Each structure stands twice: as structure tokens, then as C-alpha cells.
Amino acid sequence: MGWVNGMSEQVDLASIGRQGRRLDDWVVIIEATTDRATDSFDFTAVQDLLGRLREWHASGLYNPQRYAIQLHIAAVAPYDALRCAVAYHDLASRAVGLTKSSLTRAEVLTLGEFEMGLLLPAAPPGTPSPRGRHSLISQELYTTTRALLRVSTPGEITALLVAFVTSVGGSVNVGECRPVPGMITVALSTGAEEQLHAVAESMSVAGMIIEQSLPTLVEDARLALRQLHEASN
């Protein structure tokens, strides 16, 4: 079990991490906004939040309606780092009274990518973000992994996987998986339910994202499903 600076609630690191694998260092950035435009964050409370997260070298940015924190997390994969960071943040934010807020952004970077970001000049306003082949994780994958942290039913998990595939430009097939020349096919099913498969052209951007990112996302979805079953027993 891991503790957040003496708080009475605990983070179950055994269920978040995967034992027996090498830990890498990740930089996780979490941004939160007030639930209502008329609400505001107390600056002292945000300071206290960072103090409770100091074990993870926390730093942050403050705005009356928005704050962002940056944590350094040791984990085996980006999703594990994200889940740990969100769990630590949620415990600490409740402890300092920052409860009327919603997470609006979560980003995971390698240390190398983080350091490169510090060295690169800022892009001119209006410049679209690059979506290169070597990006760590797509925006759609960020959105889906964040949503997996909040699921309450198996149906929500399947819906998130389907939404991810269609949002990056792929299609979802139902039934037996049959290889098709020139196409990428990845199983979507998280259990014994009806078979689902993501399909996209192998030379397309959608095919690249699905081939590289979807297998790990499906693994994380299966982990979320197991945790739902364990919580209901």
C-alpha cells in the first residue's frame, strides 16, 4: 500500500502497477477546472495540494478557475503512471478540500520528451500540435485512458474502446476475425462477449495508431474490467 503524506486513505499500488516488470520514469501533467464558472480555487489549498504531493516532486500552475500539477511517477507503462498520478491527486485534493473540480486534461511524457519540451521554442499561436509517428500517445488515447479511470459498468468499457477506434478513423467489425490483405485488424473484446474487431487500412494514420496503441489499451480495459468484478464481489 502507498500513503499520501500520512492521509488515512490508501492507494493500492499492487493493483495499479504490474509486478515483476522494470519501472520507468514518467512525467504526468494533470489539469483541473472548477465545476461552475462562479466557483474558484483557493490559492492556499492548491499550495497545500502540492505540499501533500511533494514526494513525487510536484510543481504546479494556478488560476482561480484552473490549476495544473506535474508529478514524476515511477511505473511500468504510461497508463500505470497516469492511474497512480490520478489516484494520488484525488486523495490529496479531497484532503485539502478541492472537491468542486473536474479533471480536464492528463498527459504522460517520458523524461526525454519532457526535457525536449523545455528546450523547444514555443509554437506560434494557432499552430496545430504535431501528430508524428513517434508521438508517445495520441490525444484520443489520452481521452480514453482518462475515461477508463471512471467506468462503472462493463458496457462503458466496450463503448470507450469502440469510440476510440472510430475517433482515430478506424471501423469496428462484429464477429469472427478474418485477416484482410492491406488491412490492420485488432481484437477489441475484453471477455467472452460478442467478438469485436478494429479495422483500418495498414498504410493509414488510423492503422498506425490502432496497430501501435490499441493492444495496450485493450489490456488496460481488461484490467479495468477485472477491477470492476473484484469491487462487485
Image: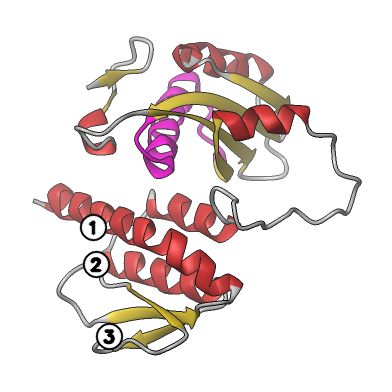
Q: In front: 192, or 3?
A: 192
Q: Is residue 12 visible?
A: no
Which sits earlier in the primary sequence, circle 3 or circle 2? 3
- Mark 1 Cα shell of 10 Å, populated few (<14), some (14-19), many (≥20): many
The answer to whether mark 1 and mark 2 are in CB contact below 8 A is yes
- The residue shown at (28%, 20%) is 2
Spatial CA span between label 3 and label 1: 22 Å
Q: Is residue 1 above or below residue 14?
A: above
Under circle 2, the secondary element is loop
Q: Is residue 134 visible?
A: yes
Q: Which residue is mark 2?
A: 190
Which sits earlier in the primary sequence, circle 1 or circle 2? 2
Under mark 2, the amino acid is Thr
- The residue shown at (34%, 28%) is 23
- Mark 2 Cα shell of 10 Å, populated few (<14), some (14-19), many (≥20): many
Numbered range of the magenta stretch: 75-101
Q: In front: 202, or 227?
A: 202
